[in-house]
Amino acid sequence: MIEADLLLTNAEVVTLDGPNARSVAILGDRIVALEDVPAREVVDLGGAVVVPGFHDAHNHMAWFGLTLSEVDLRVADLDELYRAVGEKARTVEPGEWVVGAGYDQNKIGGHPTRAELDRVAPGRKVWLKHTSGHMCVVNTPVLEALGITKGPVEVVGGVVDTETGLLQEQAQQLVNSLVLPYPVATLVDAIDLAGRQYLAEGITSCTEAGIGGGWIGKSPVEVAAYQAARDQGRLHVRVELMVAVDALRSLSAHADDGLSLGLDLGIRSGFGDDWLRIGPVKVFSDGSLIGHTSAMCQDFADTPGERGYLQGDAAELAATIVEAHRSGWRVATHAIGDAAIDLVLDAYESAARDFPRAGTRHRIEHFGVARADQVARAVALGVVPVPQGRFVNEIGDGMIRALGPERVKWAYRQRSLLDAGLVVPGSSDRPVVRGAPLLGMHDMVNQVTSSGASFNPDEAINGLEALRAFTYGSAYASCQEAVKGTITPGKLADLVVLSDNPATVDPGRIKDIAVLRTMVGGVFR
C-alpha cells in the first residue's frame, strides 16, 4: 500500500469528480488517494470542507498589487475623493505623482475633473484610474507634460477630453508614456503582495489577463518580473500569462510554418510549466460597459445617441485575430458590447475555416452583453465565454442604467451558457472589483446589486455550479483541466479548506464562508 507524505482526514471533501470523500492523501505535489492510507503526517481537519483550489480565470495580478500602494478611490462621493487626493498630495513633493485607483462615476456622482484636481493637489501630477481600467482622469501638470492642454486630440481607439482631463481606452497610453515601464523590482513587489492576498482568499491559480504591451501592460519585459518573483520564492500561486497582442511582432519563419505573428523564438501559448506558463494572446476589441465605451448594436439606454466604439479598425482587428490563430496562439479577445462580440465571433469563424486547428478553445473575455444567437454561435465554434459574476454586485447598478430593463437580461450570462452546454469559468477582473472567489460565487448565485436591486435572476446558478466555475471551469478555460480543477488522484494537490460548503450552505451566506487554509502543490501556504 502506498505511503503518502500527508493525509488530510475527518473532512468533507467536495471532489467535483464523483462522490464526496472524507480524506485526501498527497504525495509530493499530487493527490494520490481519496481514502485513509498510511502517511508520514496526518492532519485532522475536524469536519472542515475541502474543495479544489480556486482559479481566477481573468484577473490583473501585477496591476492589483500596484493598486495596494495607491490612493483607494472606492469612496462615497466626489468630495471624499478630492479629500483623499488632497491628503496624499500633501505627502509628496511638487512635481511628483499622486496616483489613485478604483473610482466609479456611477457611484460618486460623476468623474473627477482636471480643475478640481489642480485645486486639491497644486503642482502635483495627478492620475486617477477608473475602476474598469478603461479610462482615467489627469490634471493640468500631466497634460502639460504631454503637450496637450487645449483642443481636441485624435487617438485611434480612444478619446481625450482636455477640458475635463478624461482619457478613454487607447488614449491612456499617452499617460503610460510618462510612467512606464515599471522596474522589474517594483513589479515583483506587486506580484508578491497580490499573491499573498490570493492565498488568503483560497486562490491557488490565476490567469493574468494582459502583459507586455498596450494600455494594459506594465513593462515590455513583464515575463521577467514573474520569473524573478518565482526565483525569489515570491510567486505564491500558479500563473498563466496572457500576452498583449501589442507585444507580438512579425516573424521571419519559413513560409511553410505558418508562424507569421508571435514572440521571438516562436514562443506561444502553452510554453512553461505548472507554475508559470504562457497562455493566450490578449486582444482588445472594445471597452467598458459602465464607461459607455463598449461597442453596442443599439444606443445605451441612459445616453441616447451613444453606442461606444471599437478600439481599432474592424477589419484590422479581425485580421489580427485570424493571424494569431494561424500562428498557433490561443486567442482571448476582450469583447463586452454585442457589436464587438459579433466581430470576434466572425473572426474566430474565419480563423477556423481558413486555418483549421483542433482544440483551440479561443476565449471571449467578459462576453458582457450577448444575444441568444451569439450564445448559440459560441457553442458552435467551441468558444469559451469568460463572464464576471462579481460585476453583478459592485457595478451592476451602473450596468442596469446603461442597458435598461430589457437588455440587462443579456448581461453577464451564466445559466443560459450552462444550459447551452458551455463550460463557464469563474473570474473577477480584479482590481476592477474586489476579487475574492467566495464573493464571486455569492454574486453568481444571488444576482443582487450593491443597492439591493435584482440584476438578472434568470441567469442565476446554484452554489455547486458556482463552485465548479471557480475550479474546473477556470481550469478548462486554461486547457488545464487534466491537472487541476477537481480533487482527483493524479491531479495537483491544490486545495482550499473552508468553514462551510458553498454547494450546500444557504445562498445568502456564501460570502461569509471563511477560508481556513490554502494548499498549493501539497504545501499549506
Image: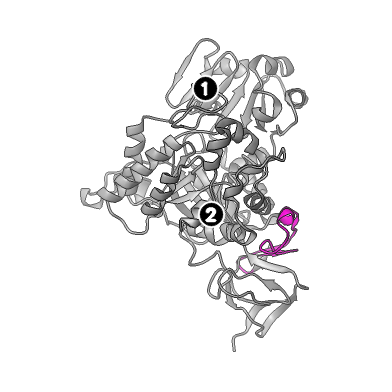
What x and y, as percent, mark residue 108? Answer: 70, 27
Picture quadrant where residue 498 is located = bottom right
- In the rendered structure, which segment of residues is drawn in magenta? 496-522
Decide which of 427, 466 is in the foreground and name it.
Answer: 466
Question: Furthest residue to the top?
Answer: 150
* Residue 215 part of the magenta-drawn span: no
SS of the residue at dot 2? loop
What x and y, as percent, mark residue 511? Answer: 72, 53
Question: Furthest residue to the bottom?
Answer: 1
Residue located at (71% from left, 15% from top): 122
| Residue 275 appears anywhere in the view | no
Decide which of 119, 183 is in the foreground and name it.
Answer: 119
Q: Where is the C terminus found, in terms of image quarters?
A: bottom right
Residue 487 vs 244, above or below: the answer is below
Residue 191 vs 128, above or below: the answer is below
Mark 1 Cα within 10 Å, few/some/many (few <14, many 20+)?
few
What x and y, as percent, mark residue 65? Answer: 64, 43
Task: Name the amino acid type tagged 2.
Answer: Pro
Q: Which mark is residue 304?
A: 1
Number of callouts: 2
* Residue 500 part of the magenta-drawn span: yes
What x and y, as percent, mark residue 331? Answer: 40, 47
Q: For marks 2 and 1, give the CA distance.
A: 33 Å
Question: Furthest residue to the left?
Answer: 256
SS of the residue at dot 1? loop
Residue underneath mark 2: 425
